[in-house]
Image: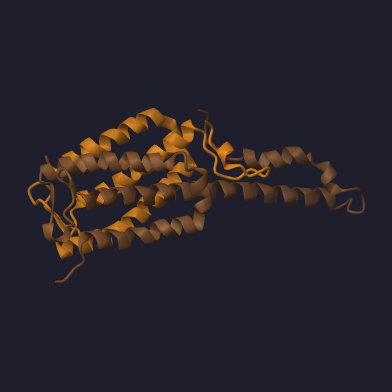
Amino acid sequence: MTHWPYLPFLLVWAVPVVALQWLVGGRYLWRARHIWPWVVLGLTVYFTLADAVAISARIWTFDARSLVGISLGPVPIEETLFYLLTALMVSQGFVLFWGAWEDRAALGQRLRRVRRIRRHSAPESAGPDPRATESAPETTRGADRQPVRSSDG
Amino acid sequence: MTYLEFLALFLAVPLAVLAGLLRRRLLDRRFLAIAGALLLISLLYMVPWDHTAAVWRLWDWSAHQTLGIRWWSVPPEEYAFCLLEALLAVTLLYALFQWRRVRLRASRAGDDPERHVAQ
């Protein structure tokens, strides 16, 4: 059976996902840029070392004809790239979900506040600005305080 | 070394260390929901790819160092590897998010991303 070599097979599988993640949630990834790249880098190094052990122990083997021929010790460069891309997809996925969850929680709180204001202001709609019944600065900051963290330090 | 021993040494041990450090914080509803979703997505996305590579013989696993079972051309240990690798990544990231008190939502005033990571 004719088949693709490892490198293009890997890139076609992973790169569109990484690109899509940036397209959908680039703002979250950018805001957390001080954290996730280090996790990706650390895991890539760690799994490359672990892979060297597995290959040396012959737990898994590769078809040499499918590899580009560059390796780090016993580890083909494609394997290092595999760990880089899988760590990237998972880490970025986590950041996107985490950010979306925060936004969803904040949006829910904002909607609840709007409903509360409407309810309070309905009987006195002809009166002064209904927002005066709410402490505006408090509510603005309150949205940011929502369920961002589950516990302290 | 068998594949299971490899998983225990390189995946289960660091996960156990992280679990020991995080303890009750692992019960956070948001973490559990996101980790569960990502693990499921990882498995669904990786297994067909892995299966195709195995059929093409890009790589193979030692019959003596795996359980000897194949689920769709892929040994069960490989499924476990996929799940544990994703779990290690999300748990590590979650731990860092907790310790550095990361917030990703933009503030209304200024929208300065730098302020969202406690230094």
Give me the residue at 43% from left, 38% from top: B94
Answer with the quarter of the image where residue B25 lies: top left
Q: How is the image coloured?
A: by chain
Indicate left or right for A133 with A31 as reference: right
Give me the residue at 22% from left, 50% from top: A77
Q: Residue B95 in the image: x percent, y percent?
A: 42, 35
Indicate left or right for B36 with A114 as reference: left
Furthest residue to the left? B64
Indicate left or right for A133 with B54 as reference: right
| Residue B7 can be seen, yes or no | no
Furthest residue to the bottom? A1
Q: Residue A53 in the image: x percent, y percent?
A: 16, 40
- Foreground of the two, A119 or A103: A103
- Quadrant where the N terminus of chain A is found in the figure: bottom left
Rendered brown, the chain in question is A
What hue represents chain B?
orange
> In this rendering, is residue B96 above or below B30?
above
Answer with the quarter of the image where residue B88 lies: top left
Indicate left or right for A29 with A106 as reference: left
